[in-house]
Amino acid sequence: MIPPLPGREAAWDLVCAHTASPGLRRHMLAVEAAMRHCARLRGEDEALWGCVGLLHDFDYEAHPEGHPLTGEPLLAAAGWPLPVRRAILSHAENSGVPRQSPLELGLHACDEITGLIVATALVRPDRDLRQVTVTSVMKKWRNPAFAAGVDREEMARAADAFGVPLEAHVGEVLAAMQAVAEDLGLAGA
């Protein structure tokens, strides 16, 4: 049983206190939306999954080399329970925390794919995420020159470990992000 969470407002306050970059904040909002959507589809706790998605990179801007290890004691001090902290630690290879729970596997699967979806929206003339399709994301996926720094093999492994075929996972994450396109600054030019 997971103890009560400090809540979404507390999570957002922590993000804002440690992250000035609008782009990084939008990334965390995208992962929050994807995690909530995935939790809903799987009958999991949407509030828990959403808070993990929202908080997962809160310390990255201030401590990119130590992330997420640097943020873990801050989360503990703010009252975030161990399952939240463990999931956030598990999303980074440098933490040494293996991904085991659906929550941990979900965060890993939702994190990087949001970046590819955002990049796909940004190359559209209208910058409207709501007009992006799974087909267009998969077309960009197959073009290694597009978003060349994206580790496609790692994203495919993450979706597989989460138990979802890659294209279906792209569809789930895309739908979640489209629902919050305005918050992500991707509701059209």
Image (cartoon, helix red, strand yellow):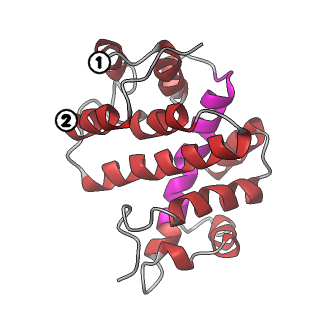
Q: Which residue is mark 1?
A: 78
Could you tell me residue 93's position as x and y percent? 54, 26
Nearer-the-camera pick, 115 or 185: 185
Q: What residue is rendered at 36% in x and 61% in y?
A: 183
Q: Which mark is residue 17?
A: 2
Residue type of the residue flagged with mark 1? Ala
Could you tell me residue 149's position as x and y percent? 50, 54
How many residues crowd around disc 1 within 10 Å: few (fewer than 14), some, or many (20 or more)?
A: few
Q: What residue is rendered at 57% in x and 68% in y?
A: 145
- Quadrant that contains the C terminus: bottom left
Location of residue 171 with respect to 86 vertically, above or below: below
Q: Residue 111 vs residue 5: left or right?
A: right
Pointer 1 or 2: first along the chain? 2
Q: Residue 11 vs residue 89: left or right?
A: left
Q: Residue 58 vs residue 31: left or right?
A: left
Q: What residue is rendered at 43% in x and 73% in y?
A: 122
- Quadrant that contains the N terminus: top right
Residue type of the residue flagged with mark 2? Ala
Q: What residue is rendered at 42% in x and 78% in y?
A: 127
Could you tell me residue 103's position as x and y percent? 62, 30
Nearer-the-camera pick, 183 or 123: 183
Residue 147 seen by the camera: no
Task: Judge whether residue 115 is colored magenta.
Answer: yes
Magenta residues, start to end: 99-118
Could you tell me residue 148's position as x and y percent? 53, 60
How many residues crowd around disc 2 within 10 Å: few (fewer than 14), some, or many (20 or more)?
A: few
